[in-house]
Image (cartoon, grey):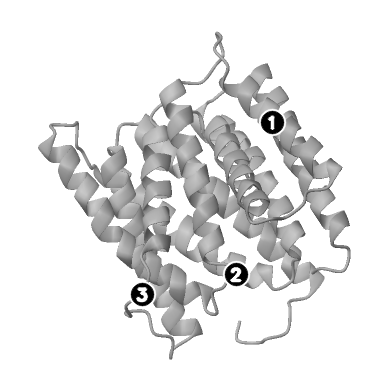
Amino acid sequence: MHSTDPPSPRRTIALTAVTMVAFASNSILCRLALQARAIDPASFTLVRILAGAIALLVIVRVVSPTARVFTPGRWAGAAFLFLYAAAFSFAYTSLSAGTGALILFGCVQAAMLAVALRSGERPRPLEWIGLAIAVAGLVYLVAPGLQAPAPVGCALMAIAGVAWGFYSLTGRGSTNPLADTSRNFLRAAPLALAVALLARVAGADVRATREGVLLAIASGALSSGLGYAIWYAALRGLSATRAATVQLSVPVFAALGGVSFLSETITLRLVLSAILILGGVGTALAGRSSARPAAR
């Protein structure tokens, strides 16, 4: 992991596959904990962030022993990370794993494309077409109807997606992503603690069974902390466009996990929305790639 050379194609594929499963596992673990009422969403967020911070600190010390984590700096990344994690947990009180992941990653890509537009990038026609298709898919998914997901859950997951998109953008200039991510997790912990305390003061149904805490730890330490570490290793062998494209597989893994572990059903609305959203984002990314054929 200390080598500066990019990993071999086979190793890149393996690392990428493991990462996508890890990212999808966040949806499965959160939904599993909340569905069983083993923990409340505020407590899940707090334990997840704390576990992620500890896991990343350990990884940083192994990979970059000289890296400084406890340093002053900007709090924007931590704020976006907290907003993502909190909205993510509360959204999954009413969304299925597949639906939540689809909204999340659709909004992540939409937010990043919107920032690119605002910064002056001139999209090609294929990018506009792809974005329009993806937005149509999101509108269809959340439109009122018998199979429509809960509107509050959809709104919260959309906020989580936008927050994650901005969080990703704040880290583009990072020279040590692992150390910076560890720092952001540490700074997000007090914010998560404040929400957990507010929930208790407000009289919310606060609970944290052993099963719920273990699921939150797995989400924070394994799916988030270790998952991010593996992802950074995989990114050295991926172009920016490929990195964005492969993340479109996460909702598929999450939906399959929801069926396998949560007895969730895959509705026709979800399937059609997935085709539109993932196909649209994929088309937009293809348009961006064709605009920069030499970029890697």
Query: Which one is in front, 126 or 231?
Result: 126
Does residue 161 lie above or below 142 as drawn? below
User: Which residue is pictured at 75% across the width and 63% down the height?
Assistant: 13
Mark 1 to mark 2: distance in Å? 27 Å
User: Which residue is pictured at 28% across the width and 39% down the height?
Assistant: 39
According to the picture, the residue beneath numbered tag 2 turns out to be: 232
Q: Position of residue 64 (x, y in %)?
A: 48, 86
User: Which residue is pictured at 70% across the width and 59% down the height?
Assistant: 243
Find residue 102 and report its image quarter: top right
N-terminal label among 3 and 1: 3
Amino acid type, mark 1: Ala
Mark nearest the camera among 3 and 1 is 3
Q: Are marks 1 and 2 in contact (CB under 8 Å)?
A: no
According to the picture, the residue beneath numbered tag 3 turns out to be: 73
Q: Mark 2 Cα within 10 Å, few/some/many (few <14, many 20+)?
A: some
Q: Mark 3 Cα within 10 Å, few/some/many (few <14, many 20+)?
A: few
Image position of 281 (left or right of 185): right
User: Which residue is pictured at 55% across the width and 40% down the height?
Assistant: 104
Amino acid type, mark 2: Tyr
Query: Which one is in front, 154 or 66?
Result: 154
For residue 205, which numbered disc appears in the image? none
According to the picture, the residue beneath numbered tag 1 turns out to be: 274
